[in-house]
Image (cartoon, grey):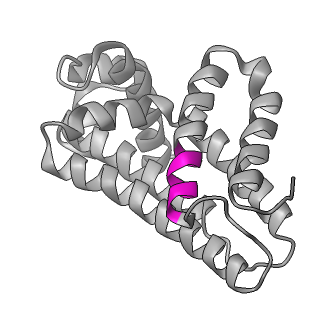
Amino acid sequence: MTGPAATREAILAGAVAVFARRGVDAASIGELAEAAGVTRPTVYAHFGAKNEIFRALAYRVRDDVLAAQAVTGTDEPAAIARTVITDYLDLTVRHLRVLELLAARARTDPECAALQVEILDRVHRRNTRFLARLAAAGLADPVIAPEKVSEAITGIVRRFAEIVDAQPGERTALADAAVAAYLRLGGLVRG
């Protein structure tokens, strides 16, 4: 990738590290430019303000999470669950800093609050519908209501992502544990 798209990507990549270290409000355009290897006017030309950079990062996270959850079939539900849960863990690890910043900003910024709710609600609704379709077809017997299974797995994935972020060698074991928890809670395995 070259040209304006590459410059935009460099700014976004550099911004994640700067925002994670300094916070969105404390970060300066100069720091963002330096992290991206561009000039301050270049940052302004692409985004106008640091809040626009953060919004672009947050919307990218939303789009990535929703794309990863876009599984429609119910054939081989355990395999689908494994793929979706593992992908969700990997995405959460990859976007952990932005998700943390989004959660903090959601307390005071209505747009960030709405975006955070959208990310979680859409994932929960999709997962709830998936489990409900499986249950209706006799392929699952959730131990708790499907929407509660979704809430629980989100919490498990978020906590496991924090651990994987600090200890990358734990990724496979924690992905397997998250999948096992989902399969049990969703009633996709017996016993």
Q: Nearer the viewer, residue 191 or 60?
A: 191
Magenta stretch, residue numbers: 147-154
The residue sitting at 76% across, 52% down in the picture is 184
Nearer-the-camera pick, 167 or 50: 167
Q: Is residue 148 left or right of residue 21?
A: right
Q: Is residue 79 or residue 48 the one in the foreground? A: 79
Q: Does the magenta stretch include residue 131?
A: no
Q: Position of residue 21 (x, y in %)?
A: 37, 13
The x and y percentages for residue 138 are 78, 81
**Residue 11 in view, yes or no:** no
Image quadrant assignment for residue 94: top right
Indicate left or right for 130 with 126 as reference.
right
Can residue 178 be seen in this snapshot? yes
- Note whether 161 is above or below 20 in the view shown: below
Residue 126 location in percent, x, y? 54, 70
Q: In the rendered view, does 183 fall on the left or right side of 12?
A: right
